[in-house]
Image (cartoon, coloured by chain):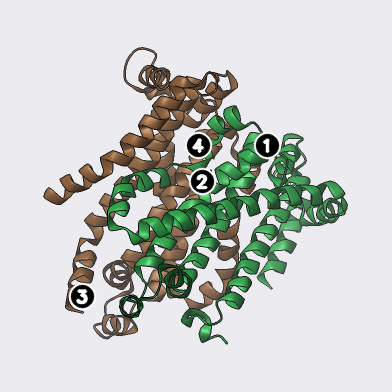
Chain colours: A green, B brown
Amino acid sequence: MPIVVILVVWQLLTVFSSNIESVLPPPADIGRRLVEVLGESATWLQIGQTLEGWALSLVVASLIGLALGILLGSSAIAYRMARFVVDFLRSVPPIALLPVGLLTLGAALQLKVALATFAALWFLLIQVIHGIWDVEPMMKDVARSYHISPMLRLTHIVIPSVSAYFSTGLRLASIAALGTVVATEFLGGVDGMGLAIYNAQLGGDMSRTYAYGIVIVVLALVLNSSLLAVERRLLRWHPMHRRAA
Amino acid sequence: MGRRLLAAVLTLPLLAVLVGLWWWTAARSTSPYYPSLDKVWHSFATLWLPGPGSLLKSDFVPSVVNLLAGWGLAIVVGIAAGVLIGMSDVLWTALRPGIELARATPMIVIFPIIFVIFGFSDWGQRWIILIASLWPILLNTIEGVRSVDPVVRDVARSYRLNRPDRVLFVMIPAALPQIMTGLRVAAGHAVVVMVASEYFASTRGVGFQVHLAMQSFDSPATYATTVLLGLIGYVLSLAVRALEHLVLGWHIRMRDTARARA
């Protein structure tokens, strides 16, 4: 309801003042442009390119995050040795690596994946470490006294306990990865939705810029909610989601 | 002190291995895009340490001023708006979808719009930094205020504290741990957006210099400036942590005693 009011006021505003149009095109124009943009096959190709970068970087970041997280979570000495390096790298703005990445990797898919992996990794790593720390001490003792093999301990005790932490990390990592992929495309000139919006604003086509912006926002929302849906389904057994069922 | 020393000693090996690896592979590399560490260090010293030809005053200072201005304004606006929204169920229900939407939006989307309005100015940079760092502070403040113990609220009301006192001495302190989390996340966003906006549209700043160095294929300067950007991010995160200890000292001590008792 408030949205309708805003749209009507917005539309009226652009009718009465023409110089606002260069910044804020009338919603009807944006709507028409959005339909037009969604009808172009190029848009769907660009959405695919952005999604490709997002998905690959999440896979790579998950693998590294799990491997390093299990190592750092299970060994106190390894954790203390790596802590400073992790803290430092975690606070490095991922997009700051863009110029070095452009020089060494070029404006291609690898660049997106490298930067987005760097952005996403820390959420996963830290969640996995905390997940391992949070394994019920009683479970560990039971496993030890029954002489359960390390492999079984991993699959039946550690992984279930870590999975809830991991999926929270994955949702945060997904937002960071998508943001970094789009920013890399926008600033680094790599094919995808980021470059599409860059070209639209470069050409001074504001309604097209807004239309692409809406596509990106919707994409972000869809990814968020589908990850949450997958999490709810896979972690049905977890106390965190049990109440909802 | 002993524990800090131990931490430092434990940190050194990995750090030495990583820097050593970089130094060794770069010295051996013939690629012009992977310069030796000596060259990078030399470039860093010329560009970013005080001396003739240093860019500290012309680029580093404006970057940091814009960063702190945008982030600082976001703190003020975020806490004020967050307390207001958090204390009113009507406002929260009405604004929630909008705020959640804004949080999930990749911030690069707003770049073209902000720059059409403000052009290539310091205020354009500050606005972008302000907007990008606003959402974590706003959401954490709202959540912090909404989860204040109802008993605490009732006590404040039954002692007839007036509204400003209730906000200042009850709500904000109770929500402070969560607000500080917001500040920390926001600081990370602020640095990223500072770099990106200077890279995209600016004629000065550290982000602009790294773009310039890359465009002129000056790889030592590109690496050196990237290191500086990393240091800015790290120092800001240390500063936020120090601030956290300063304002939340009481909370951390309380939590630790509670844990020790449990």
As measured in the structure, the alpha-carbon distance from the residue carrying label 3 to the one carrying label 2 is 37 Å
Judge whether residue B103 can be spotted in this image. Answer: yes
Type of the residue with mark 3: Ala
Q: Disc 3 marks which residue?
A: B258
| Cα gap from disc 1 to disc 2, whole angstroms | 16 Å
Q: Earlier in the sequence, mark 1 or mark 2?
A: 1
Q: Which residue is mark 1?
A: A108
Residue type indicated by callout 4: Ala
Residue A132 sits in which quadrant? bottom left
Q: Nearer the viewer, residue A136 or B227?
A: A136
Q: For label 4, count other residues whose C-alpha is less than 10 Å away and answer few (under 14), some (14-19) or many (20+).
A: many
In the rendered image, the quadrant that contains the N terminus of chain A is: bottom right
Q: Are marks 3 and 2 in contact (CB under 8 Å)?
A: no
In the image, residue A167 sits, relative to residue B47, either above or below, namely below
Where residue B91 appears, x then y in whole percent? Answer: 52, 72
Crowd class of label 1 (few under 14; some 14 to 19; many from 20; radius 10 Å): some
* Point 18% across, 66% down: residue: B253
Which residue of the protein is positioned furthest toward the left in this rendering?
B2
Kindly report the distance in space between the C-alpha atoms of the residues bearing marks 1 and 4: 17 Å
Looking at the image, is mark 4 or mark 2 nearer the viewer?
A: 2
Left/right placement of residue A176 relative to residue A73 reads right
Mark pair 3, 1: CA separation = 52 Å
Amino acid bearing label 2: Phe
Q: Amino acid at mark 1?
A: Ala
Provide the chain ID for the residue under circle 4: A
Other-residue count near label 3 (Cα within 10 Å), few / some / many at <14 / 14–19 / ≥20: few
Q: CA distance from mark 3 to mark 4?
A: 41 Å
Helix, strand or loop for disc 3: helix
The residue indicated by pointer 2 is A118
Task: Tell me the residue that label 4 is attached to.
Answer: A96
Q: Secondary structure at mark 4?
A: helix
